[in-house]
Image (cartoon, rainbow, N blue to C red):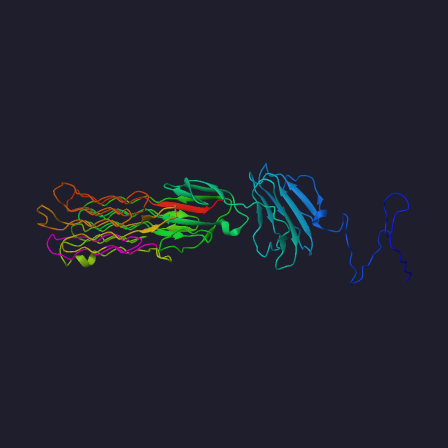
């Protein structure tokens, strides 16, 4: 093997020097250091990426190339190379990412150790990815991607600090146009409350509250309710139908209150509250089960009261429980009838006593909207009582639970002492009616769906 020793190589003419010919291999032995004091090109570094013409359609990237992506006409997907090798480099600039996101699909390789695709969701967002190994996959070689967040519309929009809140008081759509490139920011906090039930008529039980289900995202820090802990949900860019359950109608002298309707978001369903009980002549109409159960109506005599059972809460069962049972009626004699309160999200309905209907179970408070609000309370039980020939010196109607429950009524001096209505958009139950054939139970309050996420 020949050896040439020189201190400097220079061109004889011009300013270019060529080493070898095509196919030759130059070996740099171990321990040799190459020092670059000028500009190096063609060595596979990100400084030597070969930039391509602007792309306007989905495509698969090639290692060593950079791409400008025009997504003004719709969202675009850039698929990373299959079977990459260490050092493979791909660069992407999203020219219109704020209008339509550019998704970088991982093509079975990890991206920074995870299995999520990368989304460029702002104008001129740029990223250079270098492949490392199977465990870490493609890693960011720069920090040129502006932070991106969920962008969505629907319902009534408000903000609290860095979080946006969408409140749905009626059924509609939650439309997500963009998601974050950080998976943690795609998790939403939610509150889903179903419609409250109507109270029973004519000494009826209080209506049960609609089911209450809440989850707080890992990126959030508001003060949640004691029932927080339902399944977390991470959103994607799509339309989510939102159903807000209506409150149930109050029962009349021969019927239980109507149950509330379910509320839904994504995979979460909260069950409507169970109607308050009643006891028509000749038999018993038991309270209904639901998100929270309806309160029981006591019979005209102690022999009838066992058939007037309470409505069960958390039906169907979920964890944490979405509600509680209704209360029992008072086992009096003659016309001494005090019915139980409807169950609430935070407590069971109160039992009727010798001189008062059972109070509705309390709701629970959450600050998902930025301030503490209680929702999903039970309605109070209706009674005999007041100055009438039904029950001399009888009891008062049960109070509605804290958070919007309607109060129960007694027959009193009015001709048709109907129960109080549950407050709208709290999912609270209506109160039971007083002792009169024209005394209906109060209607249940409609439900609500509230969604919250980090937007800046």
Q: Position of residue 355 (x, y in %)?
A: 14, 53
Q: Position of residue 182 (x, y in %)?
A: 53, 50
> Which image quarter: residue 416?
top left
Along the viewing direction, whichever of 284 and 195 lies nearer the viewer: 195
For residue 167, side relative to residue 28 (left or right): left
418 part of magenta stretch: no
Q: Which residues are magenta?
A: 322-349
> Which residue is at a point 14% across and 51% down the rendered structure image?
395
Name the main secondary structure of what is drawn in magenta. loop
Which image quarter is the N terminus in? bottom right
Is residue 58 visible in the rendered image? The answer is: no
For residue 304, side relative to residue 160 (left or right): left
Q: Position of residue 350 (x, y in %)?
A: 22, 55
Q: Position of residue 36 (x, y in %)?
A: 77, 52
For residue 11, side relative to residue 433 (left or right): right
Up/down of 232 relative to 166, above or below: below
């Amino acid at each position: 093997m020949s050896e040439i020793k020189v201190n400097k190589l220079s061109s004889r003419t011009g300013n270019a020097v060529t080493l070898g010919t095509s196919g030759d291999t130059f070996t740099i032995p171990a321990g040799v250091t190459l020092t670059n004091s000028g500009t190096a090109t063609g060595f596979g570094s990100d400084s030597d990426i070969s930039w391509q013409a602007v792309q306007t359609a989905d495509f698969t990237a090639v290692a060593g190339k950079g791409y400008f992506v025009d997504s003004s006409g719709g969202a675009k997907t850039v698929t990373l190379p299959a079977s990459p090798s260490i050092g493979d480099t791909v660069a992407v600039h999203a020219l219109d990412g704020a209008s339509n996101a550019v998704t970088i699909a991982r093509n079975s390789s990890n991206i920074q150790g995870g299995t999520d695709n990368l989304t460029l969701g702002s104008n001129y967002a740029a990223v250079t990815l270098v492949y490392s190994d199977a465990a870490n996959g493609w890693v960011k070689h720069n920090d040129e991607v502006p932070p991106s967040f969920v962008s969505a519309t629907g319902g009534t929009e408000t903000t609290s600090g860095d979080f946006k809140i969408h409140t749905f008081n009626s059924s509609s759509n939650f439309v997500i146009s963009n998601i974050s490139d950080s998976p943690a920011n795609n998790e939403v906090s939610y509150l889903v409350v179903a419609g409250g039930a109507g109270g029973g008529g004519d000494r009826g039980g209080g209506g049960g509250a609609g089911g209450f289900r809440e989850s707080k995202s890992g990126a959030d820090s508001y003060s949640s309710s004691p029932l927080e802990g339902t399944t977390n949900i991470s959103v994607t860019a799509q339309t989510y139908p939102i159903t807000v359950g209506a409150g149930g109608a109050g029962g009349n002298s021969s019927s239980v209150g109507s149950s509330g309707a379910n509320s839904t978001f994504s995979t979460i369903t909260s069950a409507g509250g169970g109607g308050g009980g009643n006891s028509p002549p000749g038999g018993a109409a038991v309270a209904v089960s639901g998100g929270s159960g309806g309160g029981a109506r006591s019979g005209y005599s102690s022999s009838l009261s066992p058939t007037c059972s309470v409505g069960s809460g958390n039906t169907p069962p979920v964890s944490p429980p979405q509600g509680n049972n209704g209360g029992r009626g008072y086992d009096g004699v003659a016309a001494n009838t005090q019915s139980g309160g409807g169950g609430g999200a935070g407590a069971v309905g109160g039992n009727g006593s010798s001189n008062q209907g059972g109070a509705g179970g309390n709701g629970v408070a959450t600050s998902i909207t930025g301030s503490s609000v209680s929702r999903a309370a039970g309605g109070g039980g209706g009674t005999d009582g007041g100055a009438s020939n039904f029950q001399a010196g009888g009891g008062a109607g049960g109070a509605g639970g804290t958070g919007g429950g309607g109060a129960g009524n007694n027959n009193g001096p009015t001709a048709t002492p109907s129960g109080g209505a549950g407050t709208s958009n709290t999912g609270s139950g209506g109160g039971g009616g007083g002792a009169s054939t024209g005394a209906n139970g109060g209607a249940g309050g409609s439900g609500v769906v509230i969604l919250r996420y980090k937007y800046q």
